[in-house]
Amino acid sequence: MTKGKHVAVVGAGLAGCLLACYLARRGYTVTMYERRPDPRTGKVERGRSINLALSERGLDALRRIGLDTTVMADALPMRGRMIHPVAGELDFQQYSADGERAINSISRGALNNALLAAATELPNVSAHFDHRLVGLDPKTGEMRFETPGGAVTAQADIVLGTDGFSSAVRGQLLAHTGLTESLDFLEHGYKELTIPGRDGEFALDPGALHIWPRGASMMIALPNPDRSFTCTLFWPTGGTSAFASLSSPAAIEKHFAAVYPDLLELAPNLVDDYLHNPVGVLGTVRCAPWHAYGRVGLLGDAAHAIVPFYGQGANCAFEDVVELDRVLDETGDDWDRALPEFEARRRENTEAIAQMALENFVEMRDKVASPVFQAQKKVEHALERALPGRYVSRYELVSFSTTPYAQVQRRVRRQQRLLGAAAGAAVLAVGALAAWAFRKGTGA
C-alpha cells in the first residue's frame, strides 16, 4: 500500500522529524520542507529555545521507534518544583507521591537535532531547508516554496503540516477549503534569560523546575547539561508591569531587585538578555477540520497549539504521531479514512489539554506559593499513597501516564466529587457525635 507513495512533511521541527521517522518505517518516501535554515549548521534565533519538559507521553512515542535512549542522554530529570518567594526560604514540592517520578528538562534545539539526525539517516527521508511554503493546492498536493535561490515547486501524494502555531499549511487550507480557525492569544508574552554555571557547577538545584510565582506573572528556570539554566519570564504584554515598561538598565535592575531579588547575583547577563532577547507570543489554536481531500492533514501545533504551562506541547504532538500511526495500521494506510479518524480520536483530547494548560498557568503563577495549596498537595499525595492506583492526581495522570487527556479530566472530576462527598460525610459524622455528647452531658 505504501510503496512508491510520497509524503511531504511541511515543518522539520520536533513533530515533523518524529513523523518522518514513523512514516519511513511504514515504507513511505518522505520529504521534509522547513522554512528556517538547517538548525545543525544555521544560526540559532536568540531567545527562542524554551526548554521542554519531556514526560511519559513523549517518551512513549520515542520508545516505540528506539529513540528514547539517544534523546534522554541530553535530558535532566526534575522531580518537583522549587518555589522562590520574594522573601523567605525556598520550598520544594515533589511532583509524585513517592518523590521518584520526574519530568525531563531538554533543550528544544538538542531534541530537534537528535530527531532530525534520526530522520535524515533513513534512506527514504530527505530534508530541504530555507523552503517557505507560499502555495498549496490541497486537491493535487502541488506545493510552491520561496527559497534563497528562487521559487520552487514540488508535488506529493500526501501533504502533512507540522509547521507550528503559525502554520503555512493551515493558512493554505483556510484559503482554499472550508477550514475555520480561532487564535486565542494570552495577555502574557515570554522572554528568555540565562543563569550560567558557577565554577563549573549548577547555580541552582538541577533536580527541580524553579518557579518564581508573582501572582499576575512568573518566571521559571530549567537546567541544561552545560550547567546553565534557561529562564523564561511570563509577563503581561500591556500595563505598568509589562515588558515594555522596563527600557533602561537601571529600571531593569531595580525591578528585578524588588521582584526577583535572588536573580541579580545568579544572572550576570540579565540586563543584556532582557534588552536584546525578543518577546514571544502565547496562545491557543483551534481549527476544523484538520484535513482536506484525503491527502492534506495537520498535526501538532499546526492543528491545536496550546500554551506551555503543563509542559505538554511537544508531548501532545508526539502523541499525535503515535495515534496517526495506529490509525494507519487500522485502516490499511487508507488516508481517506485515516485522516478523519485521526481527528475524531484526537480532538477531544487536545481540547482537554488546552484547557488544563490554561488552568495550570494560574496554579504556577499564583497558587503554588499559597499555604492552602501546599496543604492540599500534601493531602493529595497522602491519598495517592493510601489508595494506590485508585486515587491519582491530575498532574501524575497528565505527566506520568498515557491516559488520554479527556479521560484524565473525567477521572479527576469523579475523584473530586468522591472527596467532596467523603468530606461532607465526615462533617455530618462529627456533628452527630457532638450532638450526642451534648445530649449525654445535659441529660437530655
Image (tube, rainbow, N blue to C red):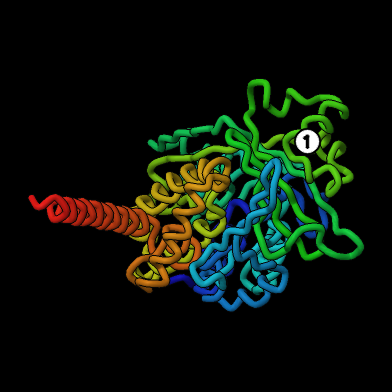
Residue that appears at 65% across and 77% down: 69
Q: Where residue 107 sits in the image (x, y, percent)?
A: 71, 59
Query: Closer to the camera, 57 or 254?
Result: 254
Q: Relative to 357, say whether 394 is above or below.
A: below
Residue that appears at 54% across and 32% down: 185
Q: Relative to 184, say whether 112 is above or below.
A: below
Which residue bears the numbered disc 1?
Answer: 256
Q: Residue furthest top?
A: 239
Residue that appears at 52% across and 68% down: 56
Query: Closer to the camera, 204 or 227?
Result: 204
Dividing the picture into quadrants, the one containing residue 117 is bottom right
Q: Residue furthest left?
A: 444
Dividing the picture into quadrants, the one containing residue 125 is bottom right
Q: Is residue 94 left or right of residue 231?
A: left
Query: Closer to the camera, 269 or 306?
Result: 269
Query: Closer to the camera, 317 or 157?
Result: 317
Q: Can the viewer see residue 302 in this picture?
A: no
Q: Where residue 338 sits in the image (x, y, percent)?
A: 37, 60
| Number of numbered discs on residues | 1
Dividing the picture into quadrants, the one containing residue 120 is bottom right
Q: Where residue 182 sits in the image (x, y, percent)?
A: 45, 33
Q: Secondary structure at mark 1?
A: helix
Q: Quadrant of the N terminus?
A: bottom left
Q: Is residue 342 left or right of residue 75?
A: left
Q: Is residue 7 left or right of residue 381?
A: right
Q: Can the viewer see residue 373 in this picture?
A: yes
Q: Residue furthest right?
A: 199
Q: Where residue 37 sits in the image (x, y, percent)?
A: 76, 50
- Name the amino acid, label 1: Phe
